[in-house]
Amino acid sequence: MYSLFDYAFGPTKVIVVSEERLQAAERRAKEEQVEAVESRISYLTDYSRQLREELKALTPEKEPQSLEEALTGDA
């Protein structure tokens, strides 16, 4: 039967990796990060464009020139 002591102080694993494989793994990780950032930029750009269109639809085309126009809504 195993005790907590056996789990805490058991033998450690040592993994040996060649320099080439390590560099390849680092390169893949960086490429995935670049893809994630580019995807996020694309999403945020599209979202920004959508918000600008909504804002344009909410903005009146002509500002009222007088207080009377503002109160009556006549342009």
Image: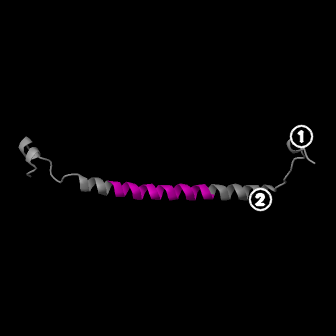
**Rendering coords of residue 14 (x, y %):** 86, 50
Q: Main secondary structure of the magenta part?
A: helix
Look at 28% across and 53% down and name the residue there: 55
In the depicted structure, whether residue 46 falls above or below residue 10: below
| Image side of residue 47 versus residue 13, left or right | left
- Queried whether the magenta region covers residue 38, the answer comes back as yes
In the depicted structure, whether residue 20 falls above or below residue 65: below
| Residue behind mark 2 | 21
Local crowd at mark 1 within 10 Å, few (<14), some, or many (≥20)?
few
| Image side of residue 41 versus residue 58, left or right | right
User: What label does residue 68 carry, if any?
Assistant: none
User: What label does residue 5 carry, if any?
Assistant: 1
**Rendering coords of residue 25 (x, y %):** 71, 57
The residue nearer to you, when weighing 60 against 25, is 60
Q: Are marks 2 and 1 in contact (CB under 8 Å)?
A: no
Q: Which residues are magenta?
A: 31-51
Check disc 2 and report its element: helix, strand or loop: helix
Residue type at mark 1: give it: Phe
Which residue is most to the front? 1
Which residue is most to the right? 1
Check disc 1 and report its element: helix, strand or loop: helix
Look at 26% across and 55% down and name the residue there: 56
Of tags 2 and 1, which is closer to the observer? 1
The residue nearer to you, when weighing 37 against 59, is 59
- Queried whether the magenta region covers residue 65, the answer comes back as no
| Image side of residue 6 versus residue 69, left or right | right
Residue type at mark 2: give it: Arg
Local crowd at mark 2 within 10 Å, few (<14), some, or many (≥20)?
few
**Rendering coords of residue 49 (x, y %):** 36, 57
N-terminal of the two: label 2 or label 1?
1
How far apart are the alpha carbons under marks 2 and 1? 35 Å
**How many marks overall?**
2
